[in-house]
């Protein structure tokens, strides 16, 4: 029996099962929802990781006297160590550094991450550039002079 015929036969057999279509629909919804929650959790963790990497680069440059060239080497070494991740280019490491320099308060960054309107259609990791744009948008809406206490009230 050709593959299409087998598929059609299986569909006819399962459509005869009482409640099967509803059951399948519910499972699909739950699976999609779980995928979305997982993607959001990953992106939130990545925002904090990117900020922390930026902070650590800044600290090392200040404390160890590292120059700007160290970011080139760091980018190459991280890309070699994590070839499946796209976030460790020279450009992105510079974004991470700029992100941490612009927003040195980790607690504020954590609060802002909670406010990011994650794209429900996008189930992939956000780049540091995309994350930076989202964070900047939220902070501009909140106002850079907002205190943590005021920010907590907004949440």
Image (spheres, rainbow, N blue to C red):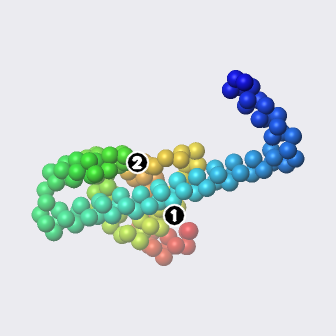
Mark 1 neighbour class, 10 Å CA radius: few under 14, some 14 to 19, many 20 or more: few
* Image position of 150 (left or right of 65): right
- What residue lies at 64% left-to-right and 52% top-to-bottom? 31
* Image position of 3 (left or right of 131): right
- What residue lies at 13% left-to-right and 66% top-to-bottom? 64
From the viewer's side, name the closer residue of 153 and 87: 87
Give how far across and how far down residue 52 sits, in percent. 33, 64
- What residue lies at 24% left-to-right and 61% top-to-bottom? 57
* Image position of 89 (left or right of 144): left
The alpha-carbon separation of the residues under discs 1 and 2 comes to 17 Å
Is residue 102 among what the camera can see? no
Q: Quadrant of the N terminus?
A: top right
Dot 1: element: helix
Q: Nearer the viewer, mark 1 or mark 2?
A: 2
Q: Residue 114, labelled with which disc? A: 1
Q: Quadrant of residue 14?
A: top right
Among the two numbered marks 1 and 2 on one chain, the one whose residue lies closer to the N terminus: 1
Q: Quadrant of the C terminus?
A: bottom right
Is residue 24 among what the camera can see? yes
Which residue is the site of mark 2? Answer: 127
Mark 2 neighbour class, 10 Å CA radius: few under 14, some 14 to 19, many 20 or more: some
The answer to whether 59 is drawn above or below residue 116 in the figure is: below
Give how far across and how far down residue 2 sits, in percent. 70, 23
Give how far across and how far down residue 62 sits, in percent. 17, 66
């Amino acid at each position: 029996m050709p593959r299409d015929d087998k598929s059609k036969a299986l569909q006819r057999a399962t459509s005869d099962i009482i409640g099967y279509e509803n059951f399948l629909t519910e499972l699909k919804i739950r699976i999609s929802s779980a995928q979305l929650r997982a993607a959001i959790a990953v992106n939130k963790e990545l925002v904090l990781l990117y900020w922390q990497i930026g902070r650590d680069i800044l600290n090392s440059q200040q404390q160890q006297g590292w120059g700007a060239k160290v970011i080139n080497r760091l980018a190459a070494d991280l890309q070699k160590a994590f070839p499946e991740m796209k976030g460790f280019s020279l450009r992105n490491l510079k974004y991470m550094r700029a992100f941490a320099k612009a927003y040195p308060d980790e607690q504020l960054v954590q609060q802002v991450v909670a406010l990011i309107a994650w794209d429900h259609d996008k189930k992939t990791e956000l780049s540091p550039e995309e994350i930076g744009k989202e964070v900047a948008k939220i902070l501009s809406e909140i106002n850079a002079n907002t205190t943590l206490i005021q920010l907590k009230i907004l949440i």
